Amino acid sequence: MNKKGMLEQLYYQYKNLMFRIAFSILNDSSLAEDAIHAAFMKLLNNSFAIDDINSKETKAFMILVVRNAAIDIYNKVNKQNNKYLDIDTINIADSSPTPIEFIINQESLDKIKNKLREIDSKYADVIVLKYFYDYSYAEISSLLSISEQTVRVRMHRAKKILASQLNDGGCIL
C-alpha cells in the first residue's frame, strides 16, 4: 500500500480520537483540527512503518503524534518559550544502561511500560519512539518538533529516571 493510501486509512480510523486528544489540550475545535492536519503533515514528511492500522501500537503512535502537534500549537498560540533546558551547559555523556537492556522477558517489558506511564511524557515519548518504534534521533526530532540535541538530552534524562524507578520497584538492572 502506498503512503497516501496508508495516511487516508489512518485518518478515517483515528480522526475522532485524534480530535478528542487535540481538543482536550487546546479547548478549541478549529485549533484541534489544525493539530490533526499538522500531525498528518508530519507523517507525510517522515518515514514510518505501520504493520496493522488497528493495532494498539498504531493507536498509541497516532495519539503521540497528535498530542505533540497540539502542544506545539498551544505553545505558539500562548507565545510561550518552550525551553526546558540550556543545552550548552549539559554534559551529554551517557553511561547509563539503555532501557532495552532491561527487556529480558514479557514481565520486564510490562514493568517498563507501567513505569513509562508514570514519568513525564516528554521523557516517555523519546523512549517509546526510540526503543518501541525504532526511530532515529533525527526522526524523533522531526516528529516532536524539537532539536536533535534536545532529543538526546531527553533520552539521557529518561534513561536515568527509568533506571531509578526500575531500581526502586525491585527490578534488577
Image: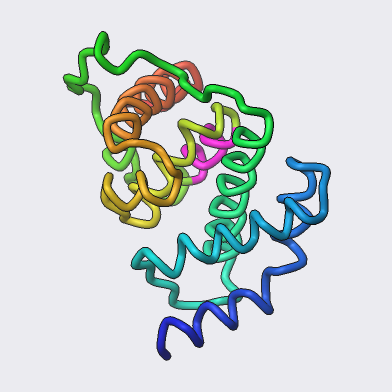
The residue sitting at 34% across, 47% down in the picture is 130
The residue sitting at 50% across, 87% down in the picture is 5
Tell me if residue 2 comes above or below residue 43 in the rendering.
below
Residue farthest along the bottom direction in this orientation: 1
Quadrant of image for the N terminus = bottom left
Q: Give the range drawn in magenta.
A: 110-117
Colour option used: rainbow
Tell me if residue 50 comes above or below residue 91 in the rendering.
below
Q: Main secondary structure of the magenta part?
A: helix
- State the image coordinates of residue 159 (x, y, percent, origin top left): 35, 27
Q: In this view, does 107 lie to the left or right of 54?
A: left
**Label tally:** 0
- State the image coordinates of residue 145 (x, y, percent, origin top left): 43, 43
Q: In this view, does 99 lie to the left or right of 74?
A: left
Residue 6 lies in the magenta-colored region: no
> In front: 115, or 28?
28
Tell me if residue 70 comes above or below residue 45 in the rendering.
above
- State the image coordinates of residue 105 (x, y, percent, origin top left): 38, 49
Q: In this view, does 102 lie to the left or right of 72?
A: left
Residue 115 lies in the magenta-colored region: yes
Tell me if residue 130 comes above or below residue 167 in the rendering.
below
The residue sitting at 79% across, 44% down in the picture is 24
Instruction: Tell me the quarter of the picture where residue 119 sits.
Output: top right
Quadrant of image for the C terminus = top left
- State the image coordinates of residue 74 (x, y, percent, origin top left): 66, 37
